[in-house]
Image (tube, rainbow, N blue to C red):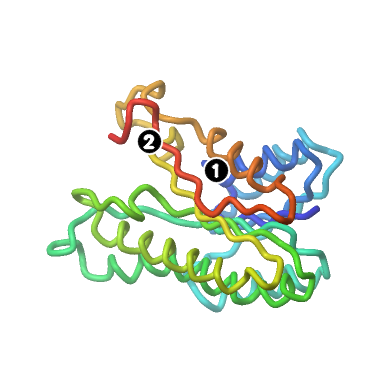
Amino acid sequence: MNIIITGASRGFGKAIAERFAANGYNLYLSSRNEVGLYKAMEDLATRFPEVSIKAKPFDLSHKAQVKDFANWLLGMHISIDILVNNAGSFEPGSVYNEPEGTMENMMAVNFFSAYHLTRALIPAMMTQQSGHVFNMCSIASFQAYKNGGAYSISKFALAGFSKNLREEMKPHGIKVTAVYPGAAYTDSWAGSGIDPKRIMVADDVAGMIYAAAQLSPQACVEDIVLRPQLGDL
């Protein structure tokens, strides 16, 4: 079984890669951070020598590089069993005063990367009549918050895309799951002063994604919502 993960150099992406590699899945990874990606690949290859791990850096905020990544994958003629659209970033600000270009940046990274990559790969999955797409949304996808601005809007868009894709793929045997994680201790929280015990760990999210991927073909987890035990920050 093969799993494709974007934004795989750290955080949720790295944790998801670890969980699936530990269970025998071959990994196909991408991130725009070339150094971080190859460091993650080396670490994973050392820990899980029994699986195939391939990685290549792309900046998926650019449509042309999304196509290059898709062509790289399709050129290997592998079965596309699981696609995890995890690439994303956060730029704080409010709609009325965030810097010019923030909306375009957030939509490019958090929404259009998943939209264009899925469109490029889904025909192969439709031919297989199988596969599973996970879109990494956010609690911000349905709960707007102060200083969330364009980020929250881009995650709303990704959630809407997930719901629409789910309906379209039902007849083709392809599952679609939207993942809505709350605060989890990744690099973005390092140095924030937040007690790591107050929020989740990335493997909490990875574990739920792995579990959802193990169900029978007749069952689909449509939404995964995870929050810290004490609630959102």
Where residue 164 appears, as percent x and y from the top left, is: 49, 70
Left or right placement of residue 232 versus residue 74 in this view? left
Q: Is residue 191 above or below residue 21?
A: above
Where residue 101 appears, as percent x and y from the top left, is: 27, 70
Identify the residue under disc 1. Answer: 10
Q: Is residue 17 above or below residue 193?
A: below
Identify the residue under disc 2. Answer: 189
- Answer few, some or many: residues within 10 Å of disc 2's Cα (few below 14, many 20 plus, some between 14 and 19): some
Which amino acid type is marked by label 2?
Trp
User: For residue 126, what is the image quadrant?
Assistant: bottom right
In front of the other: 132 or 63: 132
Where residue 70 appears, as percent x and y from the top left, is: 66, 72
Please give the name of the residue rendered at 42% of the width and 66% of the height, measured from the top-left corner.
160
Please give the name of the residue rendered at 60% of the width and 56% of the height, measured from the top-left corner.
84
Left or right placement of residue 89 versus residue 171 in this view? left
Query: Along the polypeptide, which appears first: circle 1 or circle 2?
Result: 1
Disc 2 secondary structure class: helix
Where residue 228 appears, as percent x and y from the top left, is: 39, 31
- Answer few, some or many: residues within 10 Å of disc 1's Cα (few below 14, many 20 plus, some between 14 and 19): some
Q: Quadrant of the C terminus?
A: top left
User: For residue 123, what is the image quadrant?
Assistant: bottom right
Q: For residue 110, say whether it is visible.
A: no
Number of labelled discs?
2
Left or right placement of residue 43 versus residue 98 in this view? right
Residue 29 is marked as none
Contact between marks 1 and 2 (CB within 8 A): the answer is no
Please give the name of the residue rendered at 25% of the width and 53% of the height, measured from the top-left corner.
144
**How far, Cα to Cα, is label 1 from label 2?**
13 Å
In front of the other: 98 or 203: 203
In front of the other: 161 or 108: 161
Q: Is residue 53 above or below residue 185?
A: below
